[in-house]
Image (cartoon, rainbow, N blue to C red):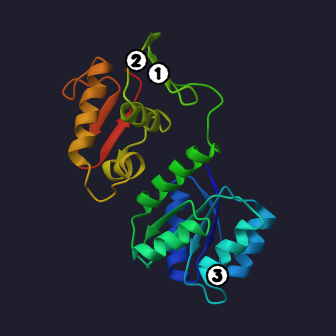
Amino acid sequence: MAELLLIEDDADIRTALIRALDQRGHATRSVSNGMDGLQGAIDHTPDVVLLDLGLPDVDGRTLLTMLRAVSQVPVIVLTARDDESEVVRVLNAGADDYIVKPFASEHLDARIRALLRRSGNTQPDGPLVVGDLRVDVRTREAWLADAPLDLSRKEFDLLALLASRPGEVVSKRALQAEIWHQPYGGADKTLDVHLSWLRRKLGETAQEPKYLHSVRGVGVKLLAPQ
């Protein structure tokens, strides 16, 4: 679970995001203006700040600069401004990531989890274990029944993500957003191919799954064999 601080002036958006993020296991604190957000980031040391740029008291990019003067907390900017020059300015001001509105809550959840992994805030102390499968995120090694698995970088990323959420159906959109950074369908075939390669290395097929179970029209979940 991540401790989140949402800085967003629109009450409807705040309510919808808090509900969606809570359902995905996060604890979300929210404020409606920039200066309260700055104070909240200092007082409560969240794991991630979600920052809207259009705030009533101070521009979000200015607030980001102020925040960076006192904290290195990861920041995801939520913005309706999608022109390339604005994105560059936001990243140069210290944002770690940005998402253009409107967006799906599962896309935001995937970005939060990816950012936390990059920042090291959610690294497990030891290997992830699901049945006879072990995945060590720190060393980027995986074993099946003590036999090492020869995985490509993307295959490992895919397996590690699913192993970190055992039994949970992870949507294709979330997998695309987190691993290929293409949340709206651009990597469908690539994802299917990588799943096929990964299944082969786990000694299974889509028709006879052991670990990787597809849920038609939804996504994929990783389970220990019965």
Q: Which residue is tagged 2?
A: 149
Task: Name the amino acid type tagged 2.
Answer: Leu
Q: Which residue is tagged 3?
A: 32
In the displayed structure, would residue 180 be above or below residue 97?
above
Q: Secondary structure at mark 2?
A: loop
Q: Nearer the viewer, residue 85 or 142?
A: 85
Residue plotted at (62% across, 52% down): 2
Q: Secondary structure at mark 3?
A: loop
Q: Secondary structure at mark 1?
A: strand
Whole-percent x, y for residue 103 in the image: 39, 68
Whole-percent x, y for residue 180 in the image: 36, 48
Q: Nearer the viewer, residue 20 or 181?
A: 181
Whole-percent x, y for residue 141 in the image: 49, 22
Task: Name the amino acid type tagged 1.
Answer: Ala
Q: What's the distance in space between the residues labelled 1 and 2, CA to CA?
A: 6 Å
Residue plotted at (54% across, 71% down): 90
Task: Name the amino acid type tagged 3.
Answer: Ser
Question: Which of the image's four quarters has the C terminus?
Answer: top left
Tell me whether the residue at label 1 lies in contact with that at label 2, contact meaning CB atoms closer than 8 angstroms: yes
Q: Nearer the viewer, residue 201 or 95?
A: 95
Residue plotted at (30% across, 33% down): 213
Asked whether residue 226 appears in the rendered view, the answer is: no
Q: Earlier in the sequence, mark 1 or mark 2?
A: 1
Q: Which residue is tagged 1?
A: 142
Label 3 crowd (10 A; few <14 / some 14-19 / many >=20): some
Q: What's the distance in space between the residues labelled 1 and 3, CA to CA?
A: 44 Å
Label 1 crowd (10 A; few <14 / some 14-19 / many >=20): many
1 or 3: mark nearer the eye? 1
Tell me whether the residue at label 3 lies in contact with that at label 2, contact meaning CB atoms closer than 8 angstroms: no
Q: Is residue 66 left or right of residue 19?
A: right
